[in-house]
Structures are given as C-alpha cells and as structure tokens.
C-alpha cells in the first residue's frame, strides 16, 4: 500500500516537471519561411536576408480583400549563419527552415559568388538540397512581401509562377543539388532562372505585383558572368532536349502576315565529341517535332508546303543555336551545354589532361550544328479558313 502511494506521488511529481519531449516547441512559437532571399551590400560587405512567411491572417483565412498573404522577416550579418541568427532575433521566434522551397539571390549577390552560402546551406540539416535556386534584379522586400495577381494555391507565389513558366520556353528550374554538382565536377556550368517584377506606369505601388520568369543567368566558378535573354533561353532548351510548350514564330511568305507560329517543340539531341589528334570538336544533332498553331492564308498546306516549312523551322533553330554557342564561347566563356561531360565519358584520358584548362579549351572548340525539324500536325483547324473560303 505504501509503495502504491509513493508511486502515485512520484508520478504526479514527474507530470509537474516534465512538460513534453526534449527540445519540443509550441507550434505557435515557430516560424516556417517558404522562400529565402539573399542580397549583398557592397558598402558594408554584409549579407542581407529576407525570409517570406505566411501572415497570421492568411493562415487563419481571414485576410481582407487585397491584403498581402505574405510577411517578410529581415536580418543581416557578415556570414549566412550570422545573418540567419539576426533574422531569428528580429522575429522573436524560433525559425525552422524545414519548409524552405526556394532561395533567391540578387544579381549583386550572384556576382559576388555563391560558394560560401551554398556550402553553409548544404550542411544545414533543415534545408533540403532539392530547394530551387533563383535570381532576381528586383528589390527582395517588394518581391517577397507583395501578393501576386495570379494566385496558385501553393505556399509561395514564387514557386507557383515558376511551375507555370516551366511549361513555356522562358525558363529552366535548377535545384541546389544540381548547382553544387555542376560546380564541383567542372563538366558543365550551371544556369539559374531570372525572376522579375513588372508593373505598368499607371499601376499604383500598393497594387498586387505581376512576376514572371524570363531568361537565365549563366555562372562560371560559382559567380554570375552574364545573361541569356528569352530567345537565347529557348535556344538553350532546344539544344538541351527539353520538351517545351512555348510558341516560336518563324517567317513564312505564303502566310498573309508573312509568318507562322509553331509550338510544342519536342527535341531529341545527340551530342558527339570528336578528337582529331589533340584538337577537340563537337557535333550537335537536333531532331525537332513541332505543330503549327497559327497560319492565315488562302493556300493549302500540302506536302510541298510542309517540306518548305520543315526547312524554315530547321534553319530557324540552327541559326539561333549557333548564335548561342558563339555567345557562350566568346562572351560568357562558360560551357553550359555540358560538352566537357561528353569528352569525359568518351575520351577519359584526354579529359584528365584537359579538365583544369577546359575554360581555355571550350572557346576554341568547333561546333557543328545539324537540325532536322518535322511537322507533327497542322493544328485542330487544319488549313486556314481563308483557304476554305477561297475554295467556296
């Protein structure tokens, strides 16, 4: 009996002392950022952080019409860890990075270099290596703190717009893991998508923003060295064999407007490295399948017209891919196509001797581009109404 009483007393005492599992925190004392923005202040040489979090009103579902769904926490420091600690002090809550979806770097930060920051994040247990990496030239506080016109239903507007943009020729998603692997192997230089805000001149500053991904930033040795515009990005995706749902307009004299629009380009790419003595070369063979989505004219699209259009589309792709190759070799000096990886696999001995000098060798490589485009379908309407009316 005495033993039972003692056990009950001990049990009650333990209940009053132990409040739960070790290191557990109340959920209302934890903040989960969805997107982390990192900027670099050249004057103070400090990192400035902006963390996008959901507002309490948005979480409760009671925010008013036009109110922002997002709040922004800020912090700064000489290192990423120091800046993260400062951000937590300002939030006056425990910051958990387990829900982080994307990291956005400003162009200033990217030009400064991303090695140290990516190294730190890759060793943080809470941050996933499949988080997206993104670039912007806009103010991070505006970008992360303002709701967008298009609501995607995802935790972050940034990722929602990216998923939509991936269906076009405007961008290419890149994760932290992919960037780190590309940088460490020296076989291919990474690219990151550019996110920007656009407003009309008449738009009030407090209006919901519109954001879009158009273009890519090119890196070498962990630093931003230049940009690909929208058209060059499309060429890069052609040459990379990425299926696309964007639209490309090419000249076609038989159309009333002098051009036609083709879309849903599906490409298969074969990259063949060539080594003649110590002189490297590369053959880039692209097979493209496309649809015609816009054609207005009185002439029927017959077999001869299809052959002509195939030739026009082939020459269009070839011209733009050759332009991009020339730009990466002579202006950017960055092997974004991964030609080095092809030489590593086919000529491992040559690659071992050339790897440390690949940045000097890549600009000298002769690249032959061959494109064969094939029309898959003329679209749901077949020939133009003008052709049918002309017959009638």
Image: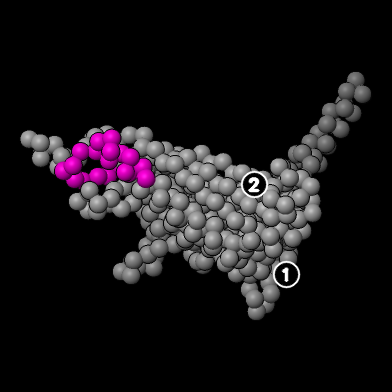
Label 2 and label 1: CA atoms lie apart by 44 Å
Which one is in front, 146 or 130?
130
Q: Residues within 10 Å of mark 1 (few under 14, many from 20)?
A: few
Residue 23, magenta (yes or no)? no
User: Where the C terminus falls, by quadrant?
Assistant: top left
Would you place residue 72 above or below residue 34 in this image?
below
Give me the disc on residue 78.
1
What secondary structure is marked by label 1? loop
In the shown orientation, is residue 255 left or right of residue 209? left
Q: Residue at x 33, y 34 (%)?
A: 377
Residue 294, magenta (yes or no)? yes
Q: Residue at x 28, y 50 (%)?
A: 252
In the shown orientation, is residue 359 left or right of residue 255? right
Residue 90 x %, y %: 64, 64
Q: Which residues are magenta?
A: 293-311
- Image quadrant assignment for residue 45: bottom right
Which one is in front, 331 or 147?
331
Q: Residue at x 57, y 67 (%)?
A: 331
Which one is in front, 178 or 18?
178
């Amino acid at each position: 009996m005495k033993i039972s009483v003692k056990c009950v007393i001990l049990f009650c005492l333990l209940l009053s002392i132990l409040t739960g599992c070790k290191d557990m925190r109340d959920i209302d004392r934890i903040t989960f950022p969805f997107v982390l923005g990192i900027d670099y202040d050249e004057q103070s040489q400090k990192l400035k952080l902006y963390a996008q979090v959901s507002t309490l009103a948005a979480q409760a579902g009671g925010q008013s019409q036009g109110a922002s769904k997002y709040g922004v926490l800020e912090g700064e420091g000489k290192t990423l860890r120091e800046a993260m600690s400062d951000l937590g002090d300002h939030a006056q809550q425990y910051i958990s990075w387990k829900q982080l979806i994307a990291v956005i770097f400003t162009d200033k930060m990217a030009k400064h270099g991303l090695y140290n920051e990516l190294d730190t994040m890759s060793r943080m247990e809470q941050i996933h290596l499949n988080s997206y990496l993104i670039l912007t030239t806009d103010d991070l506080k505006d970008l992360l703190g303002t709701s967008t016109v298009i609501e995607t239903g995802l935790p972050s507007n940034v990722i929602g717009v990216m998923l939509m943009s991936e269906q076009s020729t405007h961008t290419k998603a890149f994760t932290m893991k992919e960037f780190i692997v590309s940088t460490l192997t020296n076989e291919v230089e990474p690219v990151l998508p550019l996110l920007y805000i656009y407003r009309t001149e008449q738009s009030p500053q407090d209006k919901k923003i519109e954001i879009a991904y158009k273009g890519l930033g090119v890196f070498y040795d962990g630093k931003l060295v230049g940009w690909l515009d929208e058209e060059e990005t499309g060429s890069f995706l052609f040459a990379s064999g990425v299926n696309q749902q964007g639209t490309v307009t090419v000249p076609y004299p038989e159309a009333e407007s002098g051009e036609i629009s083709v879309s849903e380009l599906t490409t298969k790419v074969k990259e063949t490295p060539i080594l003649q003595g110590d002189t490297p070369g590369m053959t880039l063979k692209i097979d493209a399948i496309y649809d015609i989505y816009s054609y207005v004219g009185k002439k029927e699209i017959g077999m001869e017209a299809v052959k002509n259009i195939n030739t026009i589309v082939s020459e269009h792709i070839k011209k733009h891919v050759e332009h991009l190759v020339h730009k990466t070799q002579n202006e950017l000096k960055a092997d974004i196509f991964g030609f080095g990886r092809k030489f590593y696999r086919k000529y491992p001995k040559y690659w071992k001797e050339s790897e440390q000098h690949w940045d000097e060798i890549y600009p000298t490589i002769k690249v032959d581009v061959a494109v064969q485009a094939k029309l898959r379908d003329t679209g749901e309407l077949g020939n133009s109404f003008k052709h049918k009316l002309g017959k009638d």
